[in-house]
Image (cartoon, grey):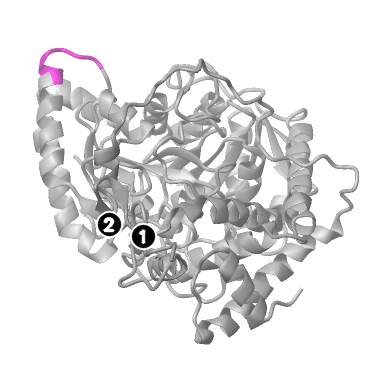
C-alpha cells in the first residue's frame, strides 16, 4: 500500500491536522513505510478468529445513577485559551 | 545517602539520622548539580517538595507507620498534578496545569511521598528514545551520547543517576521496561487494570498501564503496593484485591518453571545481549528453577499489530486537543476548522502527527476491516499464545531490548527501525500481562535488561523472582560514573 501526498491531505483533514505542502511528500513516505510494516499481518489467516478489543475478559461495570460530580465550571474554564461569560470562545460558525 | 533503598531510608528517617526535609534538600541539590547534562526533569518543584517533606517529618514524629513517608520521588510528566504543570512532553500542554491529581499521584501523596518534580518523556509517550520530547532529549547517565530509552526516559535517567529515589512511569508498548533496561533499573509494568489510569494522560487506552521504576525489586514492591488498587473513576480498573507485595519477596524459587521462547532469541538480538540473558537464566537454574521450552508463534507480529491498535486509539484520544477547552491555541484563526488544524499542527510534534494520521487512516471508511479488525484478531492469537505458554511455566524470561542503549540520533529519522526496538515488550501489552525488567550482566559497560513476564495479576511472583536474583547478584547496585 503506497500513500500519495493527496491521500495525506485527505487523512489529515479527517484528523483536523494541518499539513503544509512541503510536509506532504515526506509524511506520505513515512506513512507508507509504516503501512509496509503493518502489512505483515496478512501472513496470517484470521477468518475464524474473534477480534480482541480489550486485554481482560471483563464486562463494563455499572454504578448507581447518582450525581457524583459537582459543578466546577470556573475551575475548568480557567484552563481555556479563550472564555467569556462562562462560554468557550471559537471563531464565528454561523453567518 | 542517595544509594540507600526505600526501606533503609525509612529506617534512617525513623531513627532520626536525617529528616525528610534534609533528604529532600539533598536530592534537590543533586538535581541542580547533575540534571543540566541529563535533562531528565521537565519541572522541579522545590518549594512544594520542601512543604511536603515538612509535613512528612510531622507524620514521622507523630509515630505514623509507612515506608514511603518522606521519601523523595519523581512523577512522569504524564500524570496530572493539580499544583504543577503537566506537559506530557508536548508543546500542546506547555502551559497546562491540571485541575486535579491523578489517582496514582493522590495515592502516593497519601502514602507520604515527596514529589521532587515531573520527568521528561517522549511526547504523549510516543517514542522509544525520549527524543520526541518538546523539551529536548534526555541523556543516558551510563553514556551521555546514548539515549535512555523511552517513553519514560526521564524517569529512568533520574533514578539511574540517583536524582530521585524512585519514579513513576507508564508503559503502553514497553515504555517502563525498555528505559529501565537501558538505564540499569528495575521497572515493572503491572497487569492491565491493576493501577488506575485516572488522570494519566491517555495514549492507547486498551494498553496503557502505570508502574514503578526503581533501583531494585524491593523498592518496586513498596511503590506498587501504594499505587495498585481498584478505582471507581477508571472504568477498566480491575476489581481484584491487592495482595501484600513485600511478604513473599524471599520465597524460595525451587521448582519455579521458567519458560524460554525461541522467538525471543532470533534475528536482530545482539549476540552479547543474548549471552548476558542466557547467563542470567542459568543463574536461575542454580537457584533451583527449571527451564522449559515454550513457543510464542505469533509474537513476531506484535509490532505490526501494535502499530495499528495504538495509533488507532491515539487518534481517537488525542482528538480532545482542539485548541478550545485547554492546551495550545493558534493565533488569529480564520474559522473553526482553521483553529483546529493549526492549533494541532503547531502543538504536536512529528511522531505524534504520524501516529494520529496512521490511526485515522486505519479507522477510516473502507480500511477498518483490513487494518483495525485484522489487528484485533491477531491480538487474540498473541494473547492465546501466552495462555498456552502459561500452562507449561510460571514466568517467561527473555531480553527486554534487542540491544543496549543506542546513540542519540541513530534511529530518530527512521520511525520503523525505532518501532522495532520494542519488539520484545509489546506483546505483553497486547495481552495485558504484567512484565518486568531487571538489570543483568552488562555489555561494554552498558546495562542489559532481563525481561520477566508473568501471568495475569501475578506481580507478587514477578517481584519475588526479581528479588531472589538481586540477592545473589549486584548488577542492580552498579551506578553510572560521574554522579557521586
Helix, strand or loop for disc 1: loop
Range shown magenta: B59-65
Q: For the point 59% across and 63% down, which residue is it?
A: B419
Task: Count all numbered tags in the image, as a single digit.
Answer: 2
Q: Residue furthest front?
A: A95
Q: For the point 64% across and 34% down, which residue is it?
A: B285
- Report in which chain the residue with disc 1 lies: A
From the image, tell me which residue sits under label 1.
A90
Is B78 above or below relative to B273? above
Q: Residues within 10 Å of mark 2 (few under 14, many from 20)?
A: some
Question: Cβ–Cβ below 8 Å for labels 1 and 2?
Answer: yes
Residue B61 shown in magenta: yes
- Report in which chain the residue with disc 2 lies: A
Quadrant of residue B261 within the rendered picture: top right
* Residue B90 visible in this rendered orientation of the protein: no
Which of B79/B92 is in front?
B92
User: Where is residue B196 shown, x and y percent of the image?
Assistant: 46, 31
Real-space Cα distance between discs 1 and 2? 8 Å
From the image, tell me which residue sits under label 2.
A82
Q: For the point 79% across and 54% down, which residue is it?
A: B369
Residue B64 shown in magenta: yes
User: Where is residue B229 shown, x and y percent of the image?
Assistant: 46, 23
Which of B274/B48 is in front?
B48
Q: Residue furthest bottom?
A: A22
Counting residues from the N terminus, which is met first, the one under dot 1 or under dot 2? 2
> Tag on residue B373?
none
Is B438 above or below relative to A28? above
Is B109 above or below relative to B34? above
Q: Residues within 10 Å of mark 1 (few under 14, many from 20)?
A: some
With B353 as the anchor, is B14 left or right in this view? left
Which of B164/A81 is in front?
A81
Is B146 above or below relative to B300? below
Amino acid at each position: 500500500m503506497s500513500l500519495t501526498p493527496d491521500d495525506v491531505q485527505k487523512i489529515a483533514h479527517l484528523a483536523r491536522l494541518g499539513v503544509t505542502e512541503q510536509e506532504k511528500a515526506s509524511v506520505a513516505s513515512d506513512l507508507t513505510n509504516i503501512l509496509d510494516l503493518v502489512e505483515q499481518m496478512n501472513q496470517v489467516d484470521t477468518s475464524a478468529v474473534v477480534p480482541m478489543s480489550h486485554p481482560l475478559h471483563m464486562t463494563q461495570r455499572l454504578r448507581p445513577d447518582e450525581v457524583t460530580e459537582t459543578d466546577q465550571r470556573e475551575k475548568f474554564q480557567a484552563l481555556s485559551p479563550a472564555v467569556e461569560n462562562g462560554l468557550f470562545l471559537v471563531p464565528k460558525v454561523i453567518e | 545517602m542517595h544509594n540507600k533503598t526505600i526501606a533503609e531510608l525509612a529506617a534512617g528517617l525513623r531513627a532520626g539520622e536525617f529528616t525528610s526535609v534534609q533528604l529532600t534538600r539533598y536530592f534537590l541539590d543533586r538535581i541542580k548539580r547533575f540534571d543540566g547534562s541529563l535533562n531528565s526533569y521537565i519541572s522541579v518543584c522545590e518549594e512544594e517538595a520542601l512543604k511536603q517533606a515538612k509535613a512528612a517529618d510531622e507524620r514521622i514524629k507523630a509515630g505514623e507507620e509507612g515506608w514511603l513517608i518522606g521519601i523523595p520521588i519523581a512523577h512522569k510528566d504524564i500524570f496530572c498534578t493539580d499544583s504543577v504543570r503537566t506537559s506530557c512532553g508536548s508543546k500542546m500542554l506547555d502551559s497546562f496545569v491540571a485541575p486535579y491529581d491523578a489517582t496514582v499521584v493522590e495515592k502516593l501523596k497519601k502514602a507520604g511521598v515527596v514529589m521532587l518534580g515531573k520527568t521528561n518523556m517522549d511526547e504523549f509517550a510516543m517514542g522509544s528514545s525520549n527524543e520526541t520530547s518538546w523539551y529536548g532529549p534526555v541523556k543516558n547517565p551510563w553514556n551521555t551520547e546514548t539515549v535512555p530509552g523511552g517513553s519514560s526516559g526521564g524517569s529512568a535517567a533520574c533514578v539511574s543517576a540517583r536524582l530521585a529515589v524512585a519514579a513513576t512511569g507508564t508503559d503502553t508498548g514497553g515504555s517502563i521496561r525498555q528505559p529501565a533496561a537501558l538505564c540499569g533499573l528495575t521497572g515493572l509494568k503491572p497487569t492491565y487494570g491493576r493501577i488506575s489510569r485516572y488522570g494519566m494522560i491517555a495514549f492507547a487506552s486498551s494498553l496503557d498501564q502505570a508502574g514503578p521504576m526503581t533501583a531494585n525489586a524491593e523498592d518496586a514492591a513498596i511503590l506498587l503496593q501504594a499505587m495498585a488498587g481498584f478505582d471507581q473513576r477508571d472504568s477498566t480498573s480491575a476489581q481484584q484485591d491487592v495482595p501484600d507485595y513485600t511478604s513473599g519477596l524471599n520465597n524460595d524459587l525451587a521448582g519455579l518453571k521458567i519458560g524460554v521462547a525461541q522467538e525471543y532469541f532470533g534475528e536482530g538480538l545482539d549476540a552479547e545481549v543474548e549471552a548476558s540473558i542466557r547467563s542470567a537464566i542459568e543463574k536461575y537454574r542454580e537457584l533451583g528453577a527449571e527451564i522449559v521450552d515454550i513457543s510464542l508463534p505469533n509474537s513476531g507480529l506484535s509490532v505490526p499489530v501494535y502499530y495499528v491498535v495504538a495509533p488507532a486509539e491515539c487518534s481517537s484520544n488525542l482528538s480532545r486537543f482542539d485548541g478550545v477547552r485547554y492546551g495550545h491555541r493558534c493565533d488569529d484563526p480564520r474559522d473553526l476548522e482553521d483553529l483546529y488544524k493549526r492549533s494541532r499542527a503547531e502543538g504536536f510534534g512529528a511522531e505524534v502527527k504520524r501516529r494520529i494520521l496512521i490511526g485515522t487512516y486505519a479507522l477510516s471508511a473502507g480500511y477498518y476491516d483490513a487494518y483495525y479488525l485484522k489487528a484485533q484478531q491477531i491480538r487474540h492469537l498473541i494473547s492465546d499464545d501466552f495462555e498456552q505458554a502459561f500452562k507449561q511455566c510460571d514466568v517467561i524470561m527473555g531480553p527486554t531490548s534487542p540491544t543496549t542503549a543506542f546513540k542519540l540520533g541513530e534511529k530518530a529519522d527512521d520511525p520503523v527501525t525505532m518501532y522495532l526496538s520494542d519488539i520484545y515488550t509489546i506483546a505483553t501489552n497486547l495481552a495485558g500481562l504484567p512484565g518486568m525488567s531487571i538489570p543483568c550482566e552488562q555489555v561494554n559497560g552498558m546495562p542489559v535488561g532481563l525481561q520477566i513476564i508473568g501471568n495475569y495479576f501475578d506481580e507478587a511472583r514477578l517481584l519475588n523472582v526479581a528479588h531472589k536474583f538481586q540477592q545473589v547478584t549486584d548488577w542492580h547496585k552498579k551506578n553510572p560514573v560521574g554522579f557521586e
